[in-house]
Image: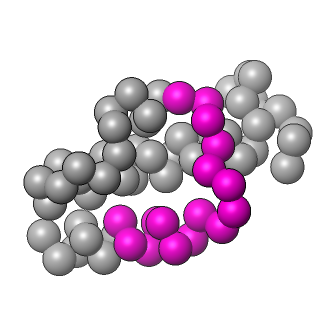
Amino acid sequence: MDTETCCEPWTIPQLASHALNSQLLLAAILTGQDLVPTQDTVSTVAYDGDLVPISDDAATRALGA
């Protein structure tokens, strides 16, 4: 999981978290909720642990909108 990606110097967890933050931002726009600070969508900070529950919650909120 510490492997660099083609988006150097991002690691796989950082890139996955970046993609998840983009999904959270879209869900926030659709629902009018504050799910993630906009600046976090471009950060290289990785979430700890399993991303699936966070992603599932964002998808449920977006579908509900």
Q: Left or right: where does residue 35 sit relative to residue 47?
A: left
Q: Most extreme residue toward the top, as rendered?
A: 8
**Residue 58 location in percent, x, y?**
35, 66
Vertical placement of residue 53 versus 24, above or below: below
Q: Left or right: where does residue 37 sit relative to residue 14?
A: left
Nearer to me, 42 or 45: 45
User: Is residue 52 in view from this perspective?
Assistant: yes
The answer to if 48 sits in the magenta stretch is yes
Vertical placement of residue 38 versus 65, above or below: above
Nearer to me, 50 or 23: 50
| Quarter holding residue 50 | bottom right
**Residue drawn where x is 44% and y is 74% of the image:** 56
**Protein image colouring:** one colour
Numbered range of the magenta stretch: 43-58
The quarter of the image holding the C terminus is: bottom left
**Residue drawn where x is 74% and y is 44% of the image:** 12
**Residue 37 location in percent, x, y?**
34, 37
Q: Left or right: where does residue 26 sit relative to residue 50?
A: left
**Residue drawn where x is 38% and y is 72% of the image:** 57
The answer to if 50 sits in the magenta stretch is yes
Vertical placement of residue 64 versus 28, above or below: below
Q: Exactly how many numbered labels are in the figure?
A: 0
Q: Left or right: where does residue 47 sit relative to residue 63?
A: right
| Quarter holding residue 61 | bottom left
**Residue drawn where x is 36% and y is 53% of the image:** 24
**Residue 15 location in percent, x, y?**
64, 41
User: Is residue 16 in view from this perspective?
Assistant: no
Vertical placement of residue 17 versus 50, above or below: above
